Image (tube, helix red, strand yellow):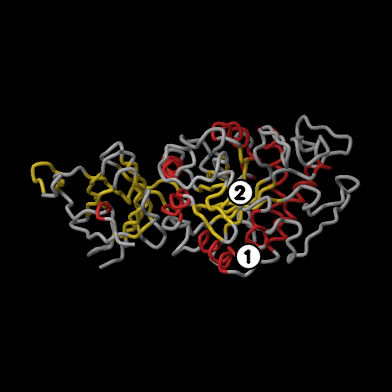
Amino acid sequence: MNPAPAAVAAILPLFAMTPAGAVSVDRPLAAAVIDATTRYQRIDGFGISEAFGTANQLRYLGDTPVQRQALDMLFDTSTGAGFSILRNLIPSDPAHTMTPVAPASPSDPPTYVWDGTSDATDWGQLWLAKKAREYGVTRFYNNAWSAPGYMKTNNHEANGGMLCGTPGAVCASGDWRQAYADYLVQHAKNWASVGLTPAALGFVNEPNYVVGYSSMDFTPAQAADFAKVLGPTMRASGLPTRITCCDAIGWSDLPNYTSAVLSDPAARQAVDVFTSHGYATPPDSPVATGRKPVWQTEWSTGRGAFNTAWDDGSTQSGFTWAQNILTGLTEANLNAFLYWWGTSVSASSNSSLILLSGTTLIPAKRYFAFVNFSRFIRPGAVRIGASSPQQSLEMAAFRNVDGSRVVVALNTATTDATTSYRLRGRGAARGCPVTPYLTNSDHDTAVQAPLCLHRGSFTATVPARSLVTYVIDETSR
């Protein structure tokens, strides 16, 4: 695809363009300052899940071009999204749990069903994780929606219910806290035995939201209490897997859990990462985490027919999701940002980024909004200073481990935004090391003509209602 003329301007670091395109020396162009000496949070990655059977939808395609295309779109760092976090469900329903037969008591050794090669117990997620590993993915986040039903007050893995033995959850069958911790750590050991050691493990999902499928109630006090059991159990296993808490349904719910954990020294030591979803309330402000990372681990807009639009004013549009990601990174200081499903066959919802329709893959524009972040901002990157001279030009900047600098700019105005980008604390870049990637109604993370530096600055235009990512090779000479 040919570069869009409006996506990049001539290299005019100090002067504005008149409507006719001539240089106006009377009006110096206001500059965005990209400051590598100002550092914020470390980025752990971007990702998706294929829980509850969507992984099997890909697996059942067999070794076909469409299956390879789907995997490339999700995990390839050159042509796809380069997602680096894969979130997996630890199944608790009778058909998929690794403990289909309930032990007689909490102290009775369970019989685990898992052989490391069959996907019968995890809906194809093990297969997908192995495929993702071929692309270099190492961050597997394994998350329980519920404990097995026999460990809960309602004796069912769905419809809420509390873990027996946590504060206020008294059961005739006894205290199942240690048994649940052992169960979770065993799942991590299972994955580790086939080279898929989970980077993180969560013991609950949406603990304040009761639904008719796998779910479990956990108050903040109960979460802190159980973390004190799970933490030492995980440490005793020798695995490097980090413990998360607590995948709250909305950002405004998370502080209740962080406060409970941080106020208890043992719970504070046990929990490594705080997690939340964006459904009830979006991540748009900082949460006190005691300097622990915070991930947004699930969010989508499921209602309505699959929407591929870039900017139609809907919550499903690519433009909306570009704003969601930018806001989460810059206002909530997120270390990771995940969508719900990467792919699915459902044409009647927007729970996925890509629709699998027969043997055709249909990406929504929100997929490309993610690509503009996830392909270029790699795990280990650090968010750095980025000040925009225009309120309608939202931006964030990052420094990758390899030294490259990434600037993501979203123009929310209905007119083009021409800006000089001044690099502070830059490396030894020379020549034309700036590569723009444009996403809007007409472009899908489309590479544009390279830009040159002049005295540590470059000037570029972000078209109206567009997203542009600038990748700056700091080692270019």
Q: Which of the 4 quarters of the picture holds residue 247?
A: top right
User: Does the residue at mark 2 contact the one at mark 1 (Cβ under 8 Å)?
Assistant: no
Which percent across, then down, holds residue 51? 65, 51
Q: Secondary structure at mark 1?
A: helix
Work out whether residue 436 or residue 286 is closer to the camera in this orientation and state it. 436
Which percent across, then down, holds residue 88? 64, 53
Q: Amino acid at mark 1?
A: Lys
> Is 422 placed above or below 67 here?
above
Report which residue position mark 2 lands on. 346
Q: Secondary structure at mark 2?
A: loop
Which percent across, then down, holds residue 73? 50, 60
Work out whether residue 447 or residue 427 is closer to the camera in this orientation and state it. 447
Residue at 77% over, 64% down: 115
Report which residue position mark 1 lands on. 130
Q: CA distance from mark 2 to mark 1?
A: 24 Å
Which percent across, then down, holds residue 23? 11, 49
